[in-house]
Amino acid sequence: MMDIELDLNHHCIETEIRRRHNAAISQYFKAASDKTALEETIDLLDQALRAFDFRQLRSRWPLLGGHASCRIWLTQNAQGHPELRMDSTRIVPPAEPA
């Protein structure tokens, strides 16, 4: 199971996931050795980009709109699907509390 901590201090959830996705792809092409962890990270970020309704996320949870100092993680559930965790809240795609 993978956890990616997201930083929403300066931008919204969608921008942060896109930024992390692009950075992971860039690292992947620069890496000389084992790329398995990077492949898993890229896959989870890509799944999140395709699965979440970011407009609905930002509307329902204003903290996800950016400028938030709470801790938020993108994780993979037991079925391999993306979900967001913040405090005691779990959010599954498209933007539903779990």
Image (cartoon, rainbow, N blue to C red):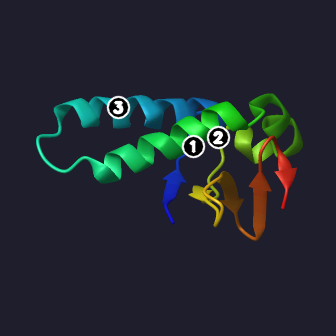
- Across and down, in percent, residue 40 comes to 42, 49
Is mark 1 in CB contact (under 8 Å) with mark 3?
A: no
Check disc 1 and give the amino acid type.
Answer: Asn
Closest to the observer, 34 or 95: 34
Dividing the picture into quadrants, the one containing residue 20 is top left
Closest to the observer, 98 or 66: 98
Is mark 2 in CB contact (under 8 Å) with mark 1?
A: yes
Residue 67 got which mark?
A: 2
Residue position for label 3: 25
| Residue drawn at 54 percent across, 35 percent down | 46
Q: How busy is the neighbourhood of tag 2: few (under 14 within 10 Å), some, or many (20 plus)?
A: some
Q: At numbered mark 2, what does the secondary structure look like: helix, strand or loop?
A: loop
From mark 1 to mark 3, how far is it between C-alphas?
A: 23 Å
- Across and down, in percent, residue 97 comes to 86, 57
Residue 44 visible, this orientation = yes
Residue position for label 1: 9
Horizontal side of 19 relative to 77 (left or right) equals left
| Residue drawn at 17 percent across, 39 percent down | 31
Closest to the observer, 65 or 52: 52
Q: In terms of sequence position, does the residue under pointer 2 or pointer 3 come before the other? A: 3
Above or below, 74 against 25 in this view is: below
